[in-house]
Image (cartoon, rainbow, N blue to C red):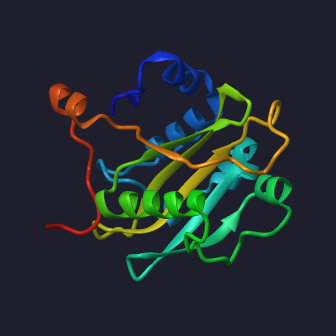
Amino acid sequence: MPRPVLSTGPLGMAMAEQEAWKQLYDYWLSKHVRGRPPTRAEIDPLVEVPRLAAHILLIDVVEGCRYRYRLAGSAYWARYGFELTGRWIEGAVPAEAAFRDTLQAVHDDGLARLLTASVTQHPDKLHIGIVLPLSDGAGGCNQILAGTFFAQEVADSPRIGRLTVREILDEAKARQLGEMPVRMGRSG
């Protein structure tokens, strides 16, 4: 599978320079089975990529359109001051609504997404998140593996602003290379 295609310009360069999200993405790619994303049983990120564990989210897909945090790494507690595990992602604030919409898109089309949010007062710095579908083994998506990598060195506020959705996989480029990503989710 080709490396993710990133936007050009300063924003794209900033994303390319961030290593942690790429490590989680590469880990997820390495666990693909015959071209399909891994199931939850086929990954163990807490053991296999422990350096990233504090930044990992495991999200349950409930009835195809609701989302609940099954697991949230310690970076989220440190950032927000409360536990996310077990909470529903309802979209009560704009950033959460944008995240919920991203989860729905990942569930529906089975494509990974990269999320970015500029750091207030530092537009050249980004908080970066990655959202990766996990297969249910039957062609659908029943869980999502995600990670958020905060730009801690310049961010003092827990407010990250509205998330901007950026697809990691550029379908036009994939078609050009003859390597379309495996899709999951509802058909038609």
Q: Quadrant of residue 150?
A: top right
The extreme bottom residue here reads: 63
Q: Quadrant of residue 145?
A: bottom right
The extreme front residue here reads: 121
Specify whether 104 is left or right of 22.
left
Q: Quadrant of residue 80?
A: bottom right
Reply above or below: 150 against 14: below
Residue at x 68%, y 67% (from the top left corner) = 71
Decide which of 180, 164 is in the foreground and name it.
164
Q: Position of residue 41 (x, y in %)?
A: 51, 66
The N terminus: image quadrant: top left
Residue at x 56%, y 67% (from the top left corner) = 59
Q: Position of residue 155 (x, y in %)?
A: 80, 37
Residue at x 51%, y 65% (from the top left corner) = 40
The C terminus: image quadrant: bottom left
Reply above or below: 13 against 91: above
Residue at x 79%, y 69% (from the top left corner) = 83
Q: Position of residue 131 (x, y in %)?
A: 50, 51
Q: Position of residue 138 (x, y in %)?
A: 29, 70
